[in-house]
Image (cartoon, helix red, strand yellow):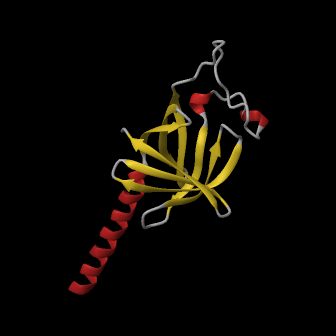
Amino acid sequence: MKKLVLLIVVALLTVASAFAQSDKVVGTYKAVREGVTSKVKVFKNGDGYRAQVIWVDNLKKADGSIRLDEKNPDPAKRKVQADNIVLIDKVKFNGKDKWEGGKIYDPTSGKVYKVSLYFKDEKTLTVKGSIGPFFQRMYWTKIQ
């Protein structure tokens, strides 16, 4: 009986640890791409995680107008402001050390790629977008 109770306790602790680990990705990150700094919030969404831009340092164009998601393949999303674009959607924790299975959207090209996320260190999230054997990595710094 004691062995059964011990086994149940170990199983519950393992499950609790996996849930805590899966939420490690939640937070606000500083991302720099092509010289443009933005802040991205990663949060739970449904049964996965989503990353959305919440601030960009070049929100306004030279003429004073607001930058929009003009290259989005979905015409309904082309009027979304640059500081509200959903970059990553539907990634799920693999139970070990990665969040994968979702897609990353590149607003500079309007293209969508497979994505995986994993931590390089405690404060650095590696964002790896790929298509076939080709990939590109970005590093986001956790600020909150």
Q: In this view, does 18 lie above or below 137?
A: below
Quarter of image, res 82: top right
Residue 70 position in % (x across, y down): 73, 31
Residue 120 position in % (x across, y down): 40, 55
Figure quadrant of the C terminus: top left
Q: Residue at x 56, y 23 (%)?
A: 58
In the foreground, 19 or 38: 38
Quarter of image, res 68: top right
Residue 91 position in % (x across, y down): 55, 55
Spot the residue most to the left: 2
Residue 74 position in % (x across, y down): 76, 39
Figure quadrant of the N terminus: bottom left
Q: Is residue 94 above or below residue 111?
A: below
Left or right of residue 109, residue 93 in this image: left
Q: Residue at x 59, y 49 (%)?
A: 89
Left or right of residue 112, residue 90 in this image: left
Spot the residue most to the front: 35
| Count of number-bearing discs | 0
In the foreground, 25 or 71: 71
Spot the residue most to the top: 63
Left or right of residue 30, residue 9 in this image: left
Q: Which residue is drawn at 30% across and 77% down?
A: 8
